């Protein structure tokens, strides 16, 4: 029984030199250091844990172990899930662990925030990470990010935003009193501040182009 459970010697050799191949029922999985993996949680009702493989090694009994660096889901963090956290958001933690390679369920991709927002289709195995996370304190790096819209929230890539052609800021349709359907139909968008600026400039322009004002003011300034 014991020999059946242990990976064959050839595989362990592979693990030490290159990577390790797990023959799991009908899937063949090749995992190397640097790969992001889904790991089976003890509680099967929970979603899989996500980790980055740092090192793969076999002990003297040929049990293959993986040293991992955990990704935390927002709900697993001290601060909890916030409104701007995306559904596929993960935090790269400073929490390391050693796990049996058998808990690896599959591989996944953890994209940079920028690359994630450029994905045409987000698959089940696609995640993104924009923060590093200190598990002991709940602190994030970076601890400040750009905020958008009137509500001054960081960007949640799951939420549709429209860009103002005036100030180039991004806005949630709901914060601008629009539905998402209405926002999708827009060809041009000016936020409430910029559209009131346009009105202000129009009235300013009609005032300043008045020749009587400009002609009199300009020569006086030059004389000084
Ligand atoms: Zn908003
Ligand atoms: Zn604007």
Image: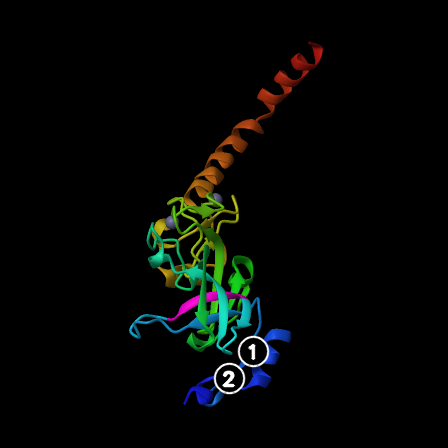
Q: Sequence order check: which comes first, mark 2 or mark 1?
A: 2
Q: Cα distance, mark 2 to mark 1?
A: 10 Å
> Which residue is at a point 57% across and 66% down the rendered structure image?
34
Q: Is residue 56 left or right of residue 148?
A: right
Residue 169 place in picture, x, y as percent: 49, 47
Q: Nearer the viewer, mark 2 or mark 1?
A: 2
Q: Is 152 a magenta residue?
A: no
User: Dot 1: what SS?
Assistant: strand
Q: Quadrant of residue 223?
A: top right
* The magenta segment: 48-54
> Which residue is at a point 56% across and 62% down the rendered structure image?
115
**46 versus 80 height, above or below:** below
Disc 1 CB within 8 Å of nearest ligand 1 atom: no
Color theme of the render? rainbow
Could you say which is closer to the camera, residue 8 or residue 185? 8
Residue 50 place in picture, x, y as percent: 44, 67
Could you say which is closer to the camera, residue 56 or residue 5? 5
Q: Is 53 a magenta residue?
A: yes
Could you say which is closer to the camera, residue 140 or residue 40? 40
Disc 2 CB within 8 Å of nearest ligand 1 atom: no
Residue 211 place in picture, x, y as percent: 60, 25
For the N terminus, which image quadrant?
bottom left
Are the residues at dot 2 and dot 1 in contact (C-beta closer than 8 Å)?
yes
For the C terminus, which image quadrant?
top right
Judging by the rendered image, the residue that carries numbered circle 1 is: 20
**173 versus 60 height, above or below:** above
Residue 149 place in picture, x, y as percent: 42, 47
Judging by the rendered image, the residue that carries numbered circle 2 is: 7
């Amino acid at each position: 029984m014991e020999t059946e459970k242990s990976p064959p010697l050839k595989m362990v050799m592979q693990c030490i030199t290159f990577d390790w191949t797990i023959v799991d029922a009908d899937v063949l999985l090749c995992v190397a250091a640097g790969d992001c993996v889904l790991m089976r949680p003890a509680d099967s009702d929970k979603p899989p844990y996500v980790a980055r493989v740092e090192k793969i090694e076999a002990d003297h009994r040929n049990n293959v172990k993986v040293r991992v660096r955990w990704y935390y889901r927002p709900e697993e963090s001290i601060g909890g899930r916030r409104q701007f956290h995306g559904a596929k958001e993960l935090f790269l933690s400073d929490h390391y662990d050693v796990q049996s390679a058998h808990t690896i369920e599959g591989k996944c991709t953890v994209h940079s925030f920028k690359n994630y927002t450029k994905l045409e289709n987000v698959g089940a195995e696609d995640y993104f990470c924009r923060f590093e996370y200190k598990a002991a304190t709940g602190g994030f790096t970076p601890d400040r990010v750009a905020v958008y819209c009137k509500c001054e929230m960081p960007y949640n890539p799951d939420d549709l935003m429209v860009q103002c052609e005036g100030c180039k800021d991004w806005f949630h349709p709901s914060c601008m009193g629009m539905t998402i359907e209405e926002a999708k139909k827009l060809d041009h968008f000016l936020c409430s501040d910029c559209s009131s600026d346009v009105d202000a400039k129009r009235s300013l322009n009609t005032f300043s182009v008045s020749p009587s004002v400009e002609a009199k003011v300009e020569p006086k300034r030059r004389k000084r």
